[in-house]
């Protein structure tokens, strides 16, 4: 599952997906791990990351738009997955004993 953060930054709507790292059982808030790409550090990205810098500059009194959660797969423990073939279909229950995973990302 993932969520989308959106904000108007310098007059431009910027939307980025992030994966919450908090438990589903922790109601009322979510935790995100966001690597901040600062301006002037990487030559390919001289302006840095628009959203990561924006989120880094937020204070406790600021707001940001959040959409989600989104995703077609949820894990329910003990090897049980609920998988939707598409957004409108009901989920199928799949139980497995082993899982092979490949991870990629920015962090």
Image (cartoon, rainbow, N blue to C red):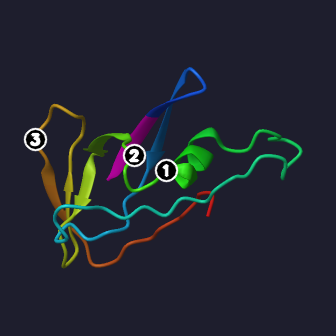
* Dot 3 and dot 2 residues touching (CB under 8 Å): no
Structural distance between the alpha carbons of marks 3 and 2: 37 Å
The residue at the far left in this view is 90
**Residue at the spot x=58%, y=49% of the render?**
52
Residue bounds of the magenta highlight: 1-6
Q: What's the mark number on residue 102?
A: none
Front of the two marks 3 and 2 = 2
Front of the two marks 1 and 3 = 1
- For disc 2, the marked residue is 62
Q: Secondary structure at mark 3?
A: loop
Q: Main secondary structure of the magenta part?
A: strand
Q: What's the mark number on residue 90?
A: 3
Structural distance between the alpha carbons of marks 1 and 3: 38 Å
Where residue 32 sits, quadrant-wise, is: bottom left
* Dot 2 and dot 1 residues touching (CB under 8 Å): yes
Position of residue 82 measured from the top left corner of the image (x, y, whole percent): 18, 56
State the residue in front, 5 or 79.
5
Residue 27, above or below 14: below
The residue at the far right in this view is 43
Q: Secondary structure at mark 1?
A: loop
Where residue 78 sits, quadrant-wise, is: bottom left
């Amino acid at each position: 599952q993932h969520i989308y953060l959106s904000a108007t930054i310098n007059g431009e709507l910027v939307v980025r997906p992030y994966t919450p790292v908090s438990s589903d059982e922790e109601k009322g808030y979510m935790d995100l791990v966001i690597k901040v790409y600062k301006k002037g550090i990487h030559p390919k990205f001289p302006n840095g990351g628009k959203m990561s810098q924006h989120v880094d500059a937020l204070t406790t009194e600021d707001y940001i738009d959040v959409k989600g959660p989104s995703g077609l797969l949820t894990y329910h423990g003990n090897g049980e997955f609920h998988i939707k073939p598409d957004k409108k279909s009901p989920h199928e229950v799949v139980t497995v004993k082993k899982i092979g995973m490949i991870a990629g990302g920015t962090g």
